[in-house]
Amino acid sequence: MALERILNDLLKDVDGSIGIAIAGFDGMSVATAQSDPNFKMEESVASAAMGLSTAQKMMKDAGAGAVKESMTTTDAAIFFMRPIDEEYWLGIALAANGNLGKARLELKKALPRIQKELQ
């Protein structure tokens, strides 16, 4: 599938990437790729969808507009997410020393190809 190919390319292009996913706001994965076999992809996707949905509601309630990006950092990792449209989002997990700037750039550049595949 073309989506998996896009995700695998992104995973290779971003230093420190652990896993990447396209998922629905319902928490169901559409496509995933991961470089760390110990990364709990499905659990992370489900939790991330809930967190991103909450952030969207919070910003709407505050009158701050739509969420463009969301990021959570931990001791061991960085989780970066970007809505694709009203139904899907794209997220990447990086090691704490991963290249966040490159991840943001590459995900933004890949969005048109991903949107085309989701149509």
Image: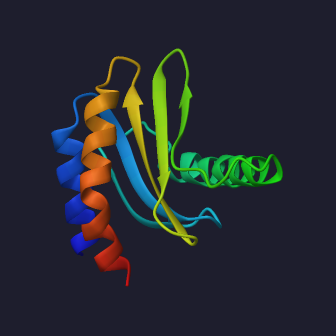
Q: Quadrant of residue 115?
A: bottom left
| Residue found 32% across the figure and 61% down from its top | 111
Colour setting: rainbow
| Residue found 49% across the figure and 46% down from its top | 81
Query: Residue furthest toward the right?
Result: 61
Q: Give the image location of residue 9, x and y in percent.
A: 17, 52
Q: Is residue 35 visible?
A: no
Query: Residue furthest toward the bottom?
Result: 119
89 lies above or below 113: above
| Residue found 53% across the figure and 14% down from its top | 75
Query: Looking at the rendering, in which quadrant would you find the C terminus?
Result: bottom left
Q: Nearer the viewer, residue 62 or 77?
A: 62
Q: Is residue 5 left or right of residue 68?
A: left
Q: Nearer the viewer, residue 55 or 76?
A: 55
Q: Give the image location of residue 23, x and y in percent.
A: 50, 63
Q: Is residue 53 visible?
A: yes
